[in-house]
Image (cartoon, grey):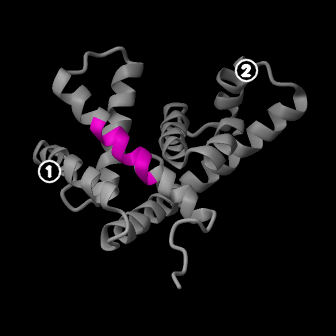
Amino acid sequence: MYIAQTLRKKNIAEYTLYMWQIEDLIRAYGCSLSRIKKEYISKFGYNDEQIDEVTDWYGNLIRMINEEGCRESGHLQINKVVVQQLIDLHNQLLDSSEFPFYRSEYYKVLPYIVELRHKGADKGQNEIETCFDALYGVMMLRLQKKTISPNTEHAVKEITTFVGMLNDYYFKDKNGELFKEQD
């Protein structure tokens, strides 16, 4: 909960990946709040008030997972909204002539996106979602201490740079600094 709050304010891309990880963590515990509290939350050394807050947060996420039919897979609506905001911003940036560096980085990453789709990624998925899926997949492989090929490492490095640019533009947009009215 505390990590999510911090990331939401500072790095929307990392926030998204973190929340996807939380969704998977909840699924790994069988969507059981009592198990999460006993086997996971208890390991962090929180005080009683913090334990109650974190338990409530997980309880709300579990409720949403159940209500939204995400017990087996998929993402919560709250996370889909963030990704959609990033997709909308991505499209605005590409449509504008004011962001040539972003457009250049996009075309640099596009072959990796095409390759990911060729290797089995959802072809109907937006390119930004494909980028996030790639980053999440590699993050999971690293957590499992699995080998990542040099080609994949290079692709992920490029995708990370691209998503980082989008992340920076996201916060500029939220602060009203991106698409300023011109005289």
Secondary structure predominantly adopted by residues drawn in magenta: helix
Residue 118 pos. (x, y %): 10, 47
Q: Quadrant of the N terminus?
A: top right
**The residue stretch that appears in magenta:** 158-166
- Type of the residue with mark 1: Val
Which of these two is toward me, 122 or 163?
163
Which of these two is toward me, 55 or 93?
93
Q: Secondary structure at mark 1?
A: helix
Q: Give the quarter of the image for residue 104.
A: bottom left
Residue 22 pos. (x, y %): 55, 38
Q: Is residue 34 left or right of residue 178?
A: right
Q: Is residue 138 above or below residue 61?
A: above
Kindly identify the residue that appears in the image at 30 percent across and 40 percent down. 134
Q: Residue furthest bottom?
A: 183
Kindly identify the residue that appears in the image at 45 percent across and 58 percent down. 83
Kindly identify the residue that appears in the image at 34 percent across and 53 percent down. 129
Residue 147 pos. (x, y %): 25, 16
